[in-house]
Image: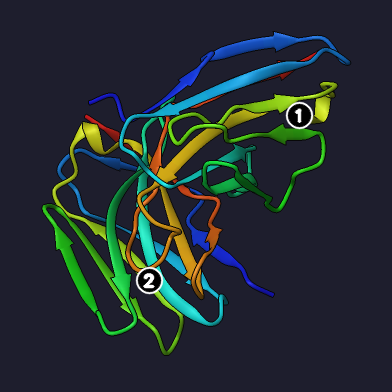
Amino acid sequence: NAGVTQTPKFQVLKTGQSMTLQCAQDMNHEYMSWYRQDPGMGLRLIHYSVGAGITDQGEVPNGYNVSRSTTEDFPLRLLSAAPSQTSVYFCASSSGRLSGANVLTFGAGSRLTVL
Amino acid sequence: KNQVEQSPQSLIILEGKNCTLQCNYTVSPFSNLRWYKQDTGRGPVSLTIMTFSENTKSNGRYTATLDADTKQSSLHITASQLSDSASYICVVKRGANNLFFGTGTRLTVIP
């Protein structure tokens, strides 16, 4: 059981380049989300989705795009990378809309450096 | 303002010793509080969840407490092992869907 799979694990970009971080889950989870983790700060929500075809913004959505065409996949797109987007990105999923005691299952993370 | 503060920021202990990590929150309305363990280079993994009516919950050598009146939680680790070296993150849920993450406590267990 793979759980939540993120690719790539590491990526270096130049300012202005675009790229997509991939996230796939095999647990048939409705809820998927993207977080970024920066030193000295808690995880911050970028975008989330409560089901295929439905996405919404989190706390720090600027500079990022998402789509949810299937239940399994939730890619995060950086449109024009900036040094401020240097971070570790985590994809997480849950079987419900975080209602009750539903727990988030996290991927292993993608470390992005923007020069 | 909804906040989650953890202390200490970092902690070094000898293998076999006990330790306690603290989490104070101002999140309202409170729904539940969860402790996650994050190993270096990995994603967080849930250790335990505390709801409003629960004071203490154990998961092996991990024991979490919750005081909803003072809005404080602690995570006590007994007889620490080298594999306990990780960051421990406190996450408080507000209402139905909002999560607030603490910055974590970095625990290092040395032989």
Q: Residue at x 59, y 47 (%)?
A: A48
- Residue A9: horizontal and vertical position, in percent? 51, 15
Q: How many marks?
A: 2
| Quarter placement of the C terminus of chain B | top left
Secondary structure at numbered mark 1:
helix
Q: Secondary structure at mark 2?
A: strand
Q: Work out whether A79 lies above or below B1.
A: above
Q: Residue A97's quadrant in the figure? A: bottom left
Q: Is residue B45 left or right of residue A54?
A: left
Q: Which mark is residue B73?
A: 2
| Foreground disc of the pair 2, 1 | 1
Residue lying furthest right: A16
Measured from the top left, where is residue A60 in percent x and y? 74, 47
| CA distance for labels 2 and 1 | 32 Å
In the rendered image, residue B25, in percent from the top left (x then y), is placed at 52, 72
In the picture, which quadrant includes the N terminus of chain B? bottom right
Q: Residue at x 36, y 32 (%)?
A: B39
Q: Closer to the camera, B1 or A33?
A: A33
Q: Which residue is mark 1?
A: A85
Q: Amino acid at mark 1?
A: Gln
